[in-house]
Image (tube, rainbow, N blue to C red):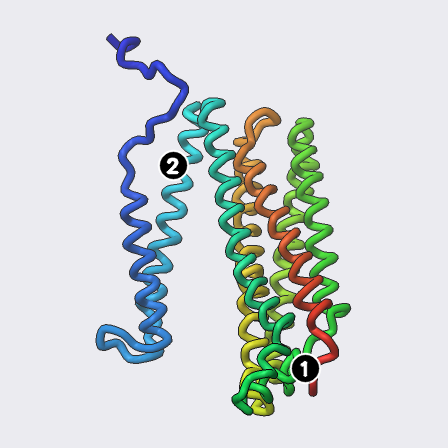
């Protein structure tokens, strides 16, 4: 009877799980909390932050529980070769969706940087004045060969260390894998620290926002959106790799079975490549000399 009840296929049928529902509720609370924090909502005054952080705590709790269950499934042998292929396809599709996010941000930046002169033909004087220069008058752009270049070198180096760690694990050299992974995490944290310092400099020196041009804030908005969204990905990737390091230290990865680490490495390489485009276009190609 037991043999008859056993699965006769290589697929894994997931047991009923509360995490999709819990995560959805928590994400909804977090988004409502964000609105309440910024604008006020449901009788809550602007600046009320507790609802947002309550939702964020629920999201983080769901992530830990849900991904913890996935790890348990892997260790129980539920991730057969067929399931592993599905996981790989899923990670590829996830990264492809992230590419679309950044494509939208680049589209906005290029639309402003390449075709701003067309708006000079407008019959409205304010529009002609606002788009007469790119970057707009009053915007002082950053020196790309200072902090941005430092972060570029940092991410490129982190790409080599995570690759080193991956190949070391494939060869069964766990000591080198741990060292390479730890160095990658340190470099990711360093990148984040440099970006925080850079943002602090921009805000306190008021480099991007000026009353001299009506659209000077557009440059700052797309800059912070594109680079900040990438910075968030670096933070997520650093956490992803840190979890992999803990699992590696616990002996959960083997040379033959380590897709969690492989997925983290794919994600990190994606973050590296996106930054190269950000550095080349937003910092270097279209920044110009700026207008003080």
Which residue carries the number 2 mark? 69
Mark 2, residues whose alpha carbon is within 10 Å: few (<14), some, or many (≥20)?
A: some
Q: Which residue is mark 1?
A: 140
Left or right: where 202 falls relative to 51: right
* Location of residue 286 with respect to 230 vertically, above or below: below
Indicate the quadrant where residue 216 lies.
bottom right
Q: Which residue does the image show at 72% across and 45% down from the upper left?
A: 160
Q: Position of residue 46 (x, y in %)?
A: 33, 79
> Where's the N terminus, which quadrant?
top left
Mark 1 and 2 residues: CB-CB less than 8 Å, in contact? no
Q: Answer with mark 1 or mark 2, whichever residue precedes in sequence.
A: 2
Q: Which mark is residue 37?
A: none
Please provide percent x and percent y for residue 168. Answer: 69, 33
Q: Is residue 219 above or below residue 54?
A: below
Seen at 39% across and 53% down, the residue is 60
**Disc 1 vs disc 2: which is toward the camera?**
1
> Real-space Cα distance between discs 1 and 2?
49 Å
Q: As rendered, which of 82 and 168 lies closer to the eye?
A: 82
Image spot of residue 61 (x, y percent): 36, 50
Q: Secondary structure at mark 2?
A: helix
Above or below: residue 211 compared with residue 65? below
Dividing the picture into quadrants, the one containing residue 66 is top left
Q: In front: 164, or 208?
A: 208
**Disc 1 secondary structure class:** loop
Q: Residue 204: tell me if it is visible.
A: no
Quarter of the image with the C terminus is: bottom right
Q: Quadrant of residue 167?
A: top right
User: Residue, x 56% and y 91% (percent of image)?
Assistant: 211
In the image shown, does 169 or 28 lie closer to the viewer?
28
Q: Position of residue 102 (x, y in %)?
A: 55, 57
> Image point 27% across, 47% down: which residue?
21
């Amino acid at each position: 009877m037991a043999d008859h009840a056993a699965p006769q296929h290589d697929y894994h049928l997931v047991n009923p799980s509360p995490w999709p529902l819990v995560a959805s509720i928590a994400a909804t609370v977090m988004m409502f909390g964000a609105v309440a924090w910024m604008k006020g909502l449901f009788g809550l005054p602007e600046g009320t932050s507790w609802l947002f952080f309550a939702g964020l705590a629920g999201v983080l709790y769901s992530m830990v529980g849900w991904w913890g269950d996935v790890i348990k499934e892997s260790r129980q042998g539920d991730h057969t070769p067929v399931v592993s292929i599905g996981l790989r396809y899923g990670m590829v599709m996830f990264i492809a969706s992230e590419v679309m996010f950044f494509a939208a941000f680049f589209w906005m930046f290029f639309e402003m940087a390449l075709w701003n002169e067309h708006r000079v033909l407008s019959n409205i004087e304010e529009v002609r004045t606002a788009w007469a220069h790119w970057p707009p008058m009053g915007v002082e752009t950053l020196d790309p060969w200072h902090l941005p270049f430092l972060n570029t070198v940092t991410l490129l180096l982190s790409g080599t260390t995570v690759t080193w760690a991956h190949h070391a694990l494939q060869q069964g050299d766990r000591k080198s894998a741990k060292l390479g992974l730890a160095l990658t995490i340190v470099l990711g944290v360093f990148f984040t620290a440099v970006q925080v310092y850079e943002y602090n400099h921009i805000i306190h020196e008021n480099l991007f926002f000026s009353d001299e041009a009506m659209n000077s804030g557009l440059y700052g908005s797309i800059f912070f959106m594109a680079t900040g969204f990438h910075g968030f990905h670096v933070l997520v990737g650093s956490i992803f790799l840190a979890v992999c390091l803990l699992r590696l230290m616990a002996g959960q990865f083997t040379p033959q079975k380590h897709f969690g680490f492989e997925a983290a490495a794919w994600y990190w390489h994606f973050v590296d490549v996106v930054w190269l485009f950000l550095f080349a276009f937003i910092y270097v190609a279209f920044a110009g000399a700026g207008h003080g």
